[in-house]
Every structure is written in structure tokens, then in C-alpha cells.
Amino acid sequence: MQSFPYQMLREIYEQPAALRRTFDLYLEGKSLKPEFVKVFSGWPVLTGEILIAGSGSSLHSGLAAKIFLEDLCGFDVAVEYSCEYTYRGDVQQHDRNVIVVSQSGETTDALSALREAHRRGFRTMAITNATSSPMAHEADVSMPLAAGVEKAIPATKSFTCQVAVLYMLALYEAVGLGRMDAATLAEHIAALRTVPDQIAGQLEAWQEQMAGLARDKYKSASSFLFLGRGIHYAIAREGALKVKESSYVHAEGYPTGELKHGPNAMVDENVPLVVLATVDPALEGSVVRYKRTLQLLRDMKIQGAKVIALANVGDKEVGDLASDCIYVQPISEYLLPMTEVVPLQLFAYFMGLEHGVNVDRLRNISKVVLDREFVR
């Protein structure tokens, strides 16, 4: 049995089991559980508009959800920081459903966003890993996770479970809207159920590779720029956050196309790029985005940039263009965030160790951000 020197590494390895437990809450074979359908029938999205509020990793799961809720359901989805939503005043008067995402369910910013949505008379949903939390009790509808206790400050298994729950919500809404029939739903669920095995089957190879990259090539980097297109932009943001909080090395996440609109001025031998270049060949939009990313990689090779790329297993073209390439088993575009984020978590973990950081207990950060005068 593998030993884990830190809870963060243990929790990265617990992600397959956490996802399976979370699936069991909502899925029955290749369909949605009837009790799940019954609960959410009381949360109709009458106007087709949804706002997702979150902070940190929870905001990034919302950015991923924006893509599949819009693509699969046709909704108009906005994503906003919880702390910003609370103080927007009454400028957003049109009716919309509000989803507040929080690992703990008691973070002050998330709670205040939920209560602000109630004040405006909006229908609310809480997605949290704590079923007894204030958020879970105060929301009109609660979608719990089954990630289990997460002791390390950096969110890992709670993040992948958030993405999974939001994806299952999108499947429910797509069926209810008549945009997905039972056969297509079964195909989506069958693919979703393969995610835990895909992660488990690649973990050891990812761990070995990321430990080597952090130790031998990128320990001295002063900053990283993470790049992703479409749904992968959310994972670029999440990967950058993990590096920042776990190693105290600066990192930022951008849409890939934004690199040449300013950030490229920073790129040199001490500022590598991390480029998400995975692709779903069955999705036309994904192929288009992939081709544009290949062109950027060609440009960056000419420029002499150091590039860590994530690519599909067997993708020699990306491998030839990048300084280092991490391979991910092919899967649906909408499921890739749950797999491709894992090697980035591991990279952040090993960067933290190389910089002497206790990755479980980070400076200036607590697991739950509370204002005791506010929480009741």
C-alpha cells in the first residue's frame, strides 16, 4: 500500500473513489436516480438564465460548468466571484437561478452570495461537500458531494466532484428540456462512469513525471502562464491557482488566444507556459480549438519558449512542439476537466515540496474563510 507523506497527495489519489461515491448519489445504472429527478423538479430554470457564484477552485468549477450548461442545455450562464456578487447591489434585476458552490458550505463570501440571491427572490442551489452546512440548509435545493473529508488546504477531490455534480445537473436539465433523449443520456453517463478508472490508471505515471519536472526542470521558474481554450480555460485557471497556493510561485491562467495580447511579454527562460492541448475528435468545436492551439505551440517553439503541454495519448504533434508533454487518455470534451486537472494538481504538489512548503498547511490561508461577525 502506498504511503502518503502529505494529505494533499493522499486526497489526489482518493479522487477515483470520491467520484464513484458522488456518482452513486445521483446515478442508477445509465440513468438519473428518480429521487434526484424529483428533488430538482422544484428548481425550474424558467428564464433560461443561471448565475454561478464561487471562490477559488469553486469559481473554476463554475467556469467549466458554464460551458456544458450552455452547450448541452442552451442556458445563458454567468459566473461571478461570490465576494463580488454580494456587493453588486440591485443592478441585476432580471430573474435567474443562482448556484452557489463551496467546498465547506460555510465560507462567508459564499453564504453572503446565497443570502443576497434569496433577498432578490431568486431560486437557489447549493453545491457543497458538507450536507450539514448553513449553505446546504438555506438553499432551495442542495446538491451534496461525496468527496469525503478534505484536510489539505488546496482543493483537489472536492474540485473534481464539484465538476462531476455540475455535469450531472446539466444532463438532468438537458433531458428535461428535451435536448437529450434517454439513449443519449445513457451514453453520457456511461462515459462519465469511466472517469474514475481513467484517473486511477494514469496516476502513478503522472506522479513520476510531475515529480521529475518539478525537481529537474522547473523548480527555478519565477512564474508560470497556464493556457487553455473553451472548457480548458477553467482548468488553466485551476492549475495556476494550485501552483500559487501550493508552492508560493507566481502563476496565472489565461485563455490561450490572450497570450499575444500582453502576457507573452513575460515569457522567457524563467517563465514557462503550461498549455492544455487535449482534444475531443468527435466534437467539431474542440478540433477547431485544438488546431489553433497547435499553431500557438508552433509560434512558441520558434520564439524559444519553454512549454509544458497536456495532450491526448498518442498525439505526436503536440509532443514534438512542446518542451515536455504530459499525456491524458482521450475522453469527451466535457469530461476532460476531471482528468486533465489531476496531473496539474500533482505538478503543484511537487513544486511545493521542491520549495519547502508544507502543502497541507499553507501560509496566510485557511480551509474555511469566515467572518465570525457575519456567520449566524
Image (cartoon, grey):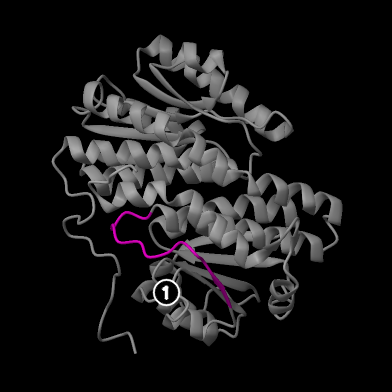
In the current view of this chain or complex, which residue is farthest to the bottom?
A: 376
Check the image and report above or below for 370 versus 333.
below
**Dividing the picture into quarters, in which one does residue 2 lie?**
top left
Quadrant the C terminus occupies: bottom left
Using the rendered image of the protein, determine whether residue 262 is visible from the camera's viewpoint.
Answer: no
Mark 1 Cα shell of 10 Å, populated few (<14), some (14-19), many (≥20):
many
Say what amino acid the circle numbered 1 marks: Gly
Judge left or right: residue 32 versus residue 304: right
Whether 269 is among the magenta residues is no
In the current view of this chain or complex, which residue is farthest to the front?
A: 1
Q: Position of residue 121 (x, y in %)?
A: 59, 85
Which residues make up the magenta segment? 142-155
Residue sitting at x 77%, y 47%: 187
Q: Tag count in the figure? A: 1
Check the image and report above or below for 64 versus 33.
above
Q: Relative to the observer, which residue lies in front, 104 or 376?
A: 104
Residue underneath mark 1: 105
Whether 154 is among the magenta residues is yes
Using the rendered image of the protein, determine whether residue 346 is visible from the camera's viewpoint.
Answer: yes
State the predominant SS element of the stretch in magenta: loop
Quadrant the N terminus occupies: top left
Q: Relative to the observer, which residue lies in front, 168 or 24?
A: 24
Q: Position of residue 177 (x, y in %)?
A: 82, 64
Q: Position of residue 7 (x, y in %)?
A: 28, 53
Q: Position of residue 152 (x, y in %)?
A: 28, 57
Judge left or right: residue 156 versus residue 366: right
Residue sitting at x 45%, y 55%: 159
**Dividing the picture into quarters, in which one does residue 81 lie?**
bottom left
Judge left or right: residue 262 versus residue 37: left
Residue sitting at x 60%, y 54%: 66
Residue sitting at x 20%, y 39%: 353
Q: Secondary structure at mark 1?
A: loop
